[in-house]
Amino acid sequence: MTKYTTTLIAVRNMEKSLKFYKELFDQDVVCDLGWNKTLTCGITLQEHFEKIVGFEESSMKFKTHNMELYFESYDFDSFLELLSEHPEVKLVHEARTFPWQQRGIRIYDPDDHIIEIGEAMECVGWRLFKEGKTVEEVVKITEHPVELVQKWHESFK
């Protein structure tokens, strides 16, 4: 049997990447194999990826815009405040509210991998319930299954 275990991303400078993921996402190293470090969330950072795989260093592509890492925040405003303390972080776009009413922002990590930070959808539901929306209205707005929205509603009460 084969099972999925991690997402590995190539990094150019391990210390810079570790600092970024620690300061912005409170990630610690749970497995340290030198050039390869796995973080609390399960993402693995790999320095010198081209040497391990046997690629020419010149073939390594960063800022490809074809994948992203996704994090959710239960306190999106606090995350934006933390992000404002890191002017070195490049934005893909400013914080915005998507049609399903989730607030989100996309940034680049030090190796130009896209990271999306979205307001936890449960929080979106709670905000909509606070505005007086019904379960059915929240299902329609958020495009999430009724069973899940009902769970949000139960935890909101």
Image: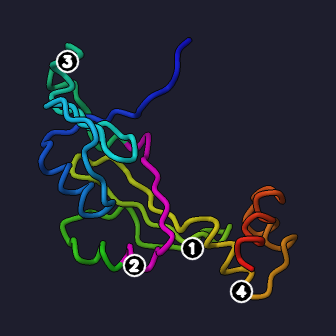
Q: Which numbered marker is on residue 130? A: 4
The amino acid pointed to by label 3 is: Ile
Q: Answer with mark 3 or mark 4, whichever residue precedes in sequence.
A: 3
**Which amino acid, mark 1?**
Thr
Q: CA distance from mark 3 to mark 4?
A: 52 Å
Q: Which residues are magenta?
A: 65-80
> Real-space Cα distance between discs 3 and 1?
41 Å
**What residue did someone put label 1 on?**
97
Left or right: 124 in relation to 64? right
Could you give the CA–CA distance between mark 1 and mark 2, rounded to whole angstroms? 16 Å
Tell me if residue 78 is in the magenta stretch: yes
Q: Secondary structure at mark 3?
A: helix
What residue is drawn where x is 41% and y is 61%? 106
SS of the residue under disc 1: strand
Q: Earlier in the sequence, mark 1 or mark 2?
A: 2
Identify the image quadrant of the N terminus. top right
Separation of residues labelled 2 and 3 (CA atoms): 39 Å
Q: Position of residue 33 (x, y in %)?
A: 18, 29
Disc 2 marks a residue whose amino acid type is Ser
Tell me the residue that label 3 is attached to: 52
As measured in the structure, the alpha-carbon distance from the residue carrying label 2 to the one carrying label 4 is 20 Å
Residue in front for this viewpoint, 131 or 148 = 148
